[in-house]
Image (cartoon, rainbow, N blue to C red):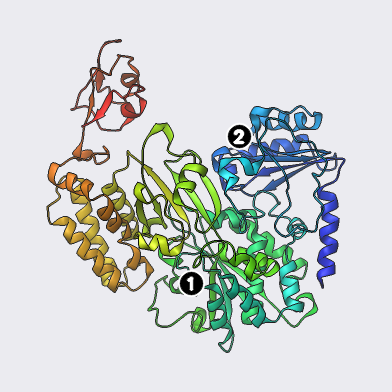
Amino acid sequence: MQVRSVKDLEKIRQDYSKKLYHPGGIKVNIGMASCGIAAGAKASFEKALREFPWGNGTQISQTGCLGFCQEEPLVEIFGNGKPRLIYRHLVENKILDAIQGYIQGDFNKKWILAQVRDPRSLLEDNIENPLVGVKPIEGIPFLEDIPFYSKQAKIALRNCGYIDPDSIEEYIAKGGYLAFIRSLSQIKPVEIIKIITESGLRGRGGAGFPTGTKWKTCAGCHGEKYVICNADEGDPGAYMDRSILEGDPHSVLEGMLIAALAIGSNQGFIYVRHEYPLAVKRLVAAIKQAEDYGLIGQNIAGSDFSFHVKISTGAGAFVCGESTALMASLEGKVGRPRAKYVHTVEKGFRDKPSNLNNVETYANVPVILLKGGQWYANIGTEHSKGTKVFSLVGKVKNTGLVEVPMGIPLREIVFDMGGGIPKKKKFKAVQTGGPSGGCIPEQFLDTPVDYQKLAELGAIMGSGGMIVMDQDTCMVNIARYFLDFLKNESCGQCTPCREGITQMSEILADICEGNGREEDIKLLEELATMIKRFSLCGLGKTAPNSVLTTILYFRDEYETHIRDKKCPAGVCKALFHYEVDEELCNGCHLCALKCPHEAITGEKKKPHHIDQDKCVKCSICYNACKFDAVLIR
């Protein structure tokens, strides 16, 4: 079937909705994003498919990531007049019992994470709620009442975890492609740009440039134009874009189609990391489905508008996240940035006007077109509108993806949604913005998360990585780690970045190895200022952030490393050793049993001793001791 109008979409939508919410059967959605597969979801999916083949009233489907990666594999089951439930840790040996129990009305509450009150997406306001009249189960919370989800507002992630990413019909049933078809037939390009401008949407790839302004500038240029999606997500610990591509690829394609319509482009490219094979696989399937329905290709919906999309995989160079380096790589050249005085919206890919946004930015566009620019602008803060997706990782109890309104305090993300620091340890810092970001200490946890406020603290929003650190984190070593990463990822084209980052890295290495000098801190600050000022691209200009913020907020740790030759966190091996506190040690012998080098001796029920000549400072004894008897000295 070729989609020609809104009516065609509505027919697909209604037909699939009837099938989706059929009262006589049940549907089992198994989270099959990378995080779910890593936790064992693939084995659960295959076992469920063997036991419940299609056509017997039980439909086994795959979905993307629901965000709560800590609880994977996550499985949603609904239908047959029963509550809609989300099960957690549903590995292979549990999946059949959970499905059979659901069918029989015998729910194992220990396996259930939550029940879903209303499964409709933001674009389904006119579809009747299939859970009306369904009696909830006592003692099981609703999804939005769980702390991890209670403060989330899902726009970019609206469909992730709820639809089959390989089914365009399911995306259409959730209101997909309606914004594009309406824009094609009812909204002029200049009006599309006006709506996006009014929304206040800023690029979610890191720079935060106003999307409407970029589109307007590109639309005003003449000649052939390109729409490019930046899916080269390289920040350690960040996986926002990957999850959207794996869970809802059509939302990105629809956003690109709307952008193409607005600026007058007929060709699109998605530049995605080679390390994201599942995302690439689902993008390929999504493009083929959209082409089959006539939503991508020549004369879309019988109009004179044509648009084609190609996928290009990058080799994993971090610098190719920068727009000009990405476009150079897309052309088959070495991925090196160029000077910013030539804007890519005027002279980008193949020296043609090119509009580049990242995955999350495009995923927001269809909702904004349907709900209105003012609706989106009412979310967030004065200068940072809408929501932002963060990957919450590190020393935090609840890891995963969270989408929150701009302006939410850091404390609510880390402690309310993230559940705080595990093992009753103390919070030390949170880094935002990936390796180019800054480390924010506890006294600023009540800072609202938006572009301006984070910049005031010396950090950046970045693409959305958020790494939590506890008392056992050495801030000097963490700065060294991120700087080493950026040193290896620098393209080496400009001297300030190539030589400056290397010099800073060597100074930090000396400090961590006990060879630091009193003047090193001042020298690091001077080098950082030079690199930020004179580097060619954003990699160099933001590279010193982790060093500058750790010096600003944790200067005492640098001074202790240099003056006292000690690492308070017990990370820099040259600057500490482990000792057993004889008063706290009860001789349980656990540390001695776990020590890989037999460096711990002592009789049971008597204080133990660590042989410093044998100890390799692996920290196994420190982590194993239940009585805090192993001390860092």
- The residue under the point 46% across, 57% down is 449
Few, some or many C-alpha atoms within 10 Å of disc 1 (few <14, some 14-19, many ≥20)? some
Q: Give x and y (percent) for residue 570.
A: 26, 37
In this rendering, position of residue 407 left or right of residue 617: right
Q: Give x and y (percent) for residue 387.
A: 56, 59
The residue carrying mark 1 is 209
Q: Secondary structure at mark 2?
A: loop
Q: Is residue 284 visible?
A: no
In this rendering, position of residue 308 left or right of residue 71: right
Q: Nearer the viewer, residue 1 or 442?
A: 442
Picture quadrant where residue 520 is located: bottom left
The amino acid type found where label 1 is placed reads Phe
Q: Is residue 268 visible?
A: yes
Q: Which quadrant of the figure contains the N terminus? A: bottom right
Any mark on residue 504, and which? none
Any mark on residue 89, and which? 2
Q: Give x and y (percent) for residue 315.
A: 47, 62
In this rendering, position of residue 478 left or right of residue 259: left
The amino acid type found where label 2 is placed reads His
Q: Nearer the viewer, residue 514 or 406?
A: 406
Q: CA distance from mark 2 to mark 1?
A: 40 Å
Q: Secondary structure at mark 1?
A: loop
Which is more N-terminal, label 1 or label 2? 2
- The residue under the point 20% across, 23% down is 611
In front of the other: label 2 or label 1? 1
Proximity of marks 2 and 1: CB atoms separated by less than 8 Å: no
Q: Nearer the viewer, residue 486 or 525?
A: 525
Few, some or many C-alpha atoms within 10 Å of disc 2 (few <14, some 14-19, many ≥20)? many
In this rendering, position of residue 161 left or right of residue 147: right
Q: Give x and y (percent) for residue 383.
A: 49, 68
Above-or-below relation of 89 to 190: above
- The residue under the point 65% across, 55% down is 158
